[in-house]
Image (cartoon, grey):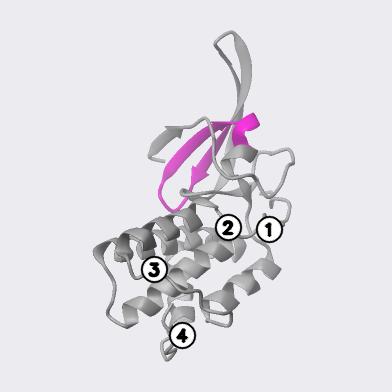
Amino acid sequence: MRPGREYPPPAREARGVVDEDGGGPASRRNAPYSLGDTVVYPHHGAGRIVGKETELRFGEEREYLTIQIRHSHMTVRLPTEAADRAGLRAVMDEAMIEEVIGVLRGERTQPQMSTSWSRRLRQNHAKIKTGDAVELAEVIRNLSIRGRKGRMSLQDTRMLAEAKKILASELMYARDMDDQDAGVFLDDLLQEIGSMDREP
C-alpha cells in the first residue's frame, strides 16, 4: 500500500441510516468538517455532510457528522472525533482526477495480481478499504483487464462492480456528474485498455 496521499480541503456546498464509531485507515487530512463539505467515506463512497449534531451518550457530549451518500441513498453517522480514524477525506481535486485517469488508461505499470481468487479478493478488498482513489482505480483497471481475458470469478465480478460504484460516486461530485454519466465516463476510459496484452 502507498503512504497517505495528500487530498485537498473539502468543497463546500435516504433511505437507510448507518451509525458508526469509525475505525479504519488514517485520514489524508486533519481539519474541521463543516455542513456542505463533500467527502469520501471508504467502502461507502462519496457524499455530503448534511448534519452536525451534539448528543449526550454515556454521560458525555459527542458531536456526530451525518453524511448523505448520494449514489446509494444511504445516510451514515459517525462521531466527528472518529472521522480521521475512519479514513474520511475530501473529494479528489482535478490533479488527482488526472492521476486516476492515467491509472484507468493503463499508463502506469501493471502490478501482478494473484492467480488465487481468494488471495486476489483479499488484496483488492484491502485496496478498496484504504479509501484511496488511485488504489481504487488500480482495482478497477486490473479486474477489467482480467475480465477481457475471460478469467473473472464471480467474486471478481462483484468486486469490480463495487469498486466502479464507489469511484463513480466520487466523480459525481468531483466533475459535477450524475451517476449515469460517471459510469459512462469510467467505461469509456476502460475501453482504452482493451488492447493491452499484459496480464495483471
Marked residue nearer the N-terminal end (3 or 4): 3
**Mark 1 is on which residue type?**
Arg
Indicate the position of residue 51 as horizontal and vertical percent values.
59, 33
Instruction: State which quarter of the image contains the N terminus.
Output: bottom right
Residue labelled with disc 4: 193
Q: Residue at x 37, y 65 (%)?
A: 160
Give the magenta-colored segment's residue range.
65-83
Indicate the position of residue 19 as horizontal and vertical percent values.
46, 30
Q: Is residue 171 visible?
A: no
Q: Residue at x 63, y 15 (%)?
A: 61
Q: Residue 82: which quarter of the image?
A: top right
Q: Residue 163: which quarter of the image?
A: bottom left
Residue labelled with disc 1: 5
Q: CA distance from mark 1 to mark 2?
A: 8 Å
- Using residue 50 as the reference point, say whether residue 190 is left or right of it: left
Q: Residue at x 69, y 50 (%)?
A: 10
Q: CA distance from mark 3 to mark 2?
A: 21 Å
Marked residue nearer the N-terminal end (4 or 1): 1
Residue labelled with disc 2: 132
Callouts 4 and 1 close, C-beta under 8 Å = no
- Magenta stretch: residue 80 in it? yes
Marked residue nearer the N-terminal end (1 or 2): 1
- Using residue 192 as the reference point, say whether residue 159 is left or right of it: left
- Magenta stretch: residue 62 in it? no
Q: Residues within 10 Å of mark 4 (few under 14, many from 20)?
A: some
Residue at the far top in the pictured view: 59
Q: Tell me the element at label 1.
A: loop
**Mark 4 is on which residue type?**
Ile
